Image (cartoon, rainbow, N blue to C red):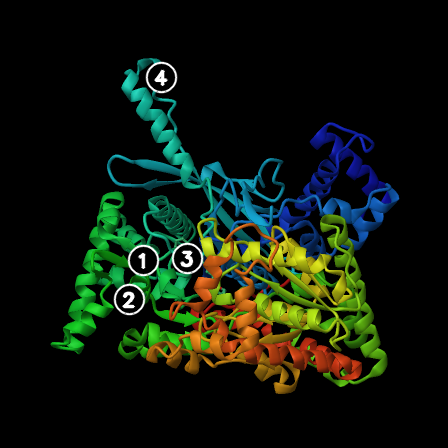
Amino acid sequence: MLTKEQYKQVFRQRLLALAGTGLDEASTYEKYAALASLVRDHIGQHWVDTTRRYDVEKQKQVYYFSIEFLPGRLLDSNLRSLGLRDLWIDVLAELGIDYQELADAEHDASLGNGGLGRLASCFLESMASLGLPGHGCGIRYTYGLFEQSIINDMQIEKPDTWLKDLNIWEYRKPNKAVEVRFGAPLGVVKAVPYDIPLIGYENSTVNTLRLWSAEVQDTSGLSYSSLAPDDYRKLLEYKNWVESISQILYPDDRYEEGRILRLVQEYFLVSAGLQSIVRHIRRKQGTDLSTLADRVAVHINDTHPALAIPELMRILLDEEGMGWDEAWRITTRTISYTNHTVLPEALEKWPVSEVQSLLPRIYEIIHEINERFCAELWQHYPGEWGRIAAMAVIADGFVKMAHLAVAGSYSVNGVAALHSSILQKDLLHLFYQHTPGKFNNKTNGITHRRWLLGANPGLADLITDTLGPGWLHQPAMLKNLQAHAEDAAFQEKVAAIKTERKQQLARLINETYHVALDCRSIFDVHIKRIHAYKRQLLNVLRIMELYNRLRDNPNLDVLPRTFLFAGKAAPGYYLAKKIIQLINVLARKVNADKTIKDKIKIVFLENYGVTLAERIIPAADVSEQISTAGKEASGTSNMKFMLNGAITVGTLDGANVEIREAVGEDNIIIFGLTAGEAAECYRTGRCNPLPIYQQDERVRQCVNQLIDGSLPVIGDEFKPLYDYLLQPSGHFLELQDFAAYVEAQQTIDQLFRDERQRWKMAITNIAQAGRFSSDYTVKEYADGIWHIRPSYFRG
Ligand code: 26Q
């Protein structure tokens, strides 16, 4: 061990070596980079040891293939996992450096759109912390999800230049590059891996997140002067095309036709990933690939990496010379698939003509998979043409990626109980009838280390003081807090921590948006992607309803509330952008209205992402989880809020169902149509909102205010939202659930008046959140799907 003086010396030296500067002149980023690079030094040996251990023990390893990852900032979590955080905070303080300021200088890797990418990162963290041999495989986008700012109430997108400064955590591995081959005119692309260490919490395990970057093949053989002018132009075109592959993350969380580069990205990812796995296996464990499925599991995160199925077939058939049956046996025992959505518009399908011209050999294989699959179905269901057509992998001129994923994998799971049952009963019903054994549920989870220990250290300390540190390794132990739920002294401590976090957030909001918040008001939070089905619009309508009541009677007896929103809209999603504009316009009006005595404030926080979530969630009193029942596959922020002591107001959708089961009906506010009732509504066409608009005066008033000049906008800005809400179908039952939602919020108002009751609810939520740790989710995947075990040796 070094002394503190020596650590100070080490820090100075690293700063000098890295940035060529002394302490006084160094920028905050340079100081951050110096510290991060010292942390990186600590990781190296553990990484090598872990990798060797997996190889020596011939452990089965899992590779989690995902087109998105959202790891968040890594300095703080890495320091914590390595047990070096307190030491460095001290050393830096003695140098006159504020640690938090350095930590805040990190650009967070925003390589995903939302829930699906964040889930992948929670899983990787849990696998490393459980000592499970599990790795991530993704794309190193030069530009992550766009940076959002709000100008004139509207969303503006700017490029996310997260790589503009040195990225400390990645290791470029040019000697591990592989070649990815596309159809004739496009040719060969070099895939270069960048490895990022994934550090287990206090267990010396270091797994790998491998992100692939597209580069041109070595062109040194071609000298420009020897090329005809036309060849030179082609060379540059080729270079541009190749570099575009890993340039940018698609900012949509639903499928849009005609995005051929997206298909290129998907194949690039799976081809590079599988080639490097196969190469590693052959190098370490010999050339026989017949036992591949006993040595690796490949998990595909939604259908985006579903081309892994034909690509593995291609490798086994064309490169290993296997016959079809053996290759198919191996493939379908190696690949498992998670579905994350039931929205029809989000289901991937690619035009046959495009797959064929971009990936001719892969298309041939998909075609053969389809032929054999349909022939097998014919055996089971002779004469049932309709059924077989509905299940085909290729139909109506499209390759249906979900059908490919189900046909080519041994396990298909949904991400919450309700979602999995909808898959089985509805979306994938025919597949469920055919192969029920493939289907299972794995309810999502979140890592309690990032979302409690990291994001809310005050609360984490209180828990450790109360229960001891065991909960960090066994989150179910949080249950022991239940015994303290009614203890007045403990309640006061939890309340004080909440207040402190609300003050911190209020300070940030005041500095950034110049809105002063009352920290005694209820912080009522709705943060997630902006999507019609997530119903931010329903939230806005009930705020308008409350505002109308306050205007009528400024002395109305309601608890003051602060409404916080954050979330990005896909750049081409017109309606979602209108919703953002509406929130901001309403905020301007309400926040400036002196007559309502500051009883409501509304703030839309820009550029939602992992880091902002870490600031907002610990400060929340109420968690809005109000999707149309049956539409949100799981949700994961619902779990994060609960873990931080917020009370959920939600529909019976996604994992809200399991949250209610965990906390009991008294500790969650559930409202609205059930999934069954909503489906019935749609099915019978009895979901016309007009009668509700006509009968409920409050509804009519709020909806009219969108267009009658009540809001401070010029022109018909919100006519599209008005039309959307009143169209006979195609909406998300906002008006159907309006009355129940308003009532649910009144229940919150009543409950929050009784402090003892309110903190009992909050503590119950924290106590029952342990079961939603991704440690348990990942254990279930490991036992039930992947059949992998923790490494024997734990450091
Ligand atoms: C597909 C094709 C082309 C372009 C984009 C896409 C695309 C990209 C991202 C489609 C969907 C997504 C993301 C989906 C997603 O985040 N789903 C969420 O997954 C979470 C983790 O399981 C769940 O908790 C959420 O309920 C679900 O909405």
The residue labelled by disc 1 is 309
> Percent from the top left, x then y, of residue 550?
70, 71
Q: Is residue 328 visible?
A: yes
Q: Secondary structure at mark 3?
A: loop
Height in image: 143 above or below 598? above
The residue labelled by disc 4 is 224
Ligand 1 has an atom within 8 Å of the beta carbon of the residue at disc 3: yes
Closer to the chain start, of discs 4 and 1, is 4
Q: CA distance from mark 4 to mark 1?
A: 39 Å
Q: CA distance from mark 2 to mark 4?
A: 48 Å
Disc 1 residue type (three-letter):
Ile
Closer to the chain start, of discs 4 and 3, is 4
Q: Using a 10 Å C-alpha cutoff, classify the residue at mark 2 as few (fewer than 14 neighbours), some (14 to 19) or many (20 or more).
A: many
Q: CA distance from mark 1 to mark 2?
A: 9 Å
Closer to the chain start, of discs 3 and 2, is 3
Closer to the chain start, of discs 3 and 1, is 3
Q: CA distance from mark 3 to mark 1?
A: 22 Å
Q: Secondary structure at mark 2?
A: helix
**Cβ atoms under marks 2 and 4 closer than 8 Å:** no
Disc 2 residue type (three-letter):
Ala
The residue labelled by disc 2 is 407
The residue labelled by disc 3 is 254
Q: Is residue 84 visible?
A: no
Height in image: 481 above or below 307? below
Closer to the chain start, of discs 2 and 4, is 4
Q: CA distance from mark 4 to mark 3?
A: 42 Å
Camera-side mark, 3 or 1: 3
> Percent from the top left, x then y, of residue 203?
65, 61
Disc 4 residue type (three-letter):
Tyr
